[in-house]
Image (spheres, rainbow, N blue to C red):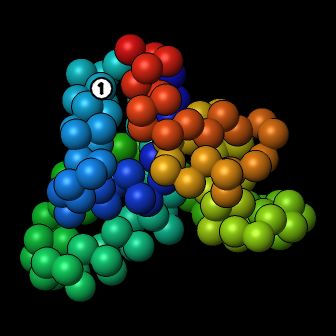
Amino acid sequence: MKVLFDTNIILDFALQREEHFNFAIKLFELIENRAIKAYLTATTITDIYYITKKIKDHRVAINFIKSLVNLFEVLNIDKRVIVKSLELDSPDFEDSVQSMAANFNGVNTIITRNVKDFNFEEINALTPKEFLKKYK
């Protein structure tokens, strides 16, 4: 199963956000056990670096990114993805970009805490709790 992870889920893990960390751990275990094939977008990587660096520091952020690229496949964001995202006319452009990157790469499930922002009909957006309940 191919699954795209939204930035907020990765940050829940990286920053050990108390309310969401336990779900993030369970999702990372599925990746490590190869129960799911996990994806991130290239833009997610840079967002994670920026936020983690601000809260922790450069070295922590870089080390975390290194571990991510060993676990996750990274989807490109190119002109085709951007143009199709603009055509969606969604109020959340970043999520449209992630949806289109996923769609163009045959990934139809996104794990996010912002399900309502992923309103592209070909994408199945689930919260971590929903995903774990449905696919465990």
How far across and down, in percent of the image, does residue 81 sit? 73, 61
Q: Is residue 68 visible?
A: no
Q: Report the number of numbered marks.
A: 1
How far across and down, in percent of the image, does residue 132 sit? 40, 25
Task: Please indicate whether residue 99 sits to the left or right of residue 67 in the image.
Answer: right
Which residue shows up at 13% across the image and 81% down it? Answer: 57
The disc labelled 1 sits on which kind of residue? Leu
Quadrant containing the C terminus in the rendered view: top left
Splitting the image into 4 quarters, where does residue 106 fall?
top right
Task: Please indicate whether residue 37 sits to the left or right of residue 79 in the image.
Answer: left
Residue lying at the far top of the rendered structure:
136
Which residue shows up at 81% across the image and 39% down it? Answer: 121
- Please tell me whether mark 1 sits on a helix, a strand or a loop: helix
Q: Which residue is mark 1?
A: 30
Residue lying at the far front of the rendered structure:
19
Task: Please indicate whether residue 12 sits to the left or right of residue 97 in the image.
Answer: left
Which residue shows up at 49% across the image and 18% down it? Answer: 134
Q: Residues within 10 Å of mark 1 (few under 14, many from 20)?
A: some
Task: Please indicate whether residue 46 sits to the left or right of residue 26 in the image.
Answer: right
Q: Is residue 52 visible?
A: yes
How far across and down, in percent of the image, does residue 75 sit? 53, 52
Q: Is residue 130 above or below residue 83?
A: above
Q: Nearer the viewer, residue 131 or 110?
A: 131
Q: Nearer the viewer, residue 75 or 95?
A: 95
How far across and down, in percent of the image, does residue 128 sit? 42, 37
Which residue shows up at 67% across the image and 57% down it? Answer: 117
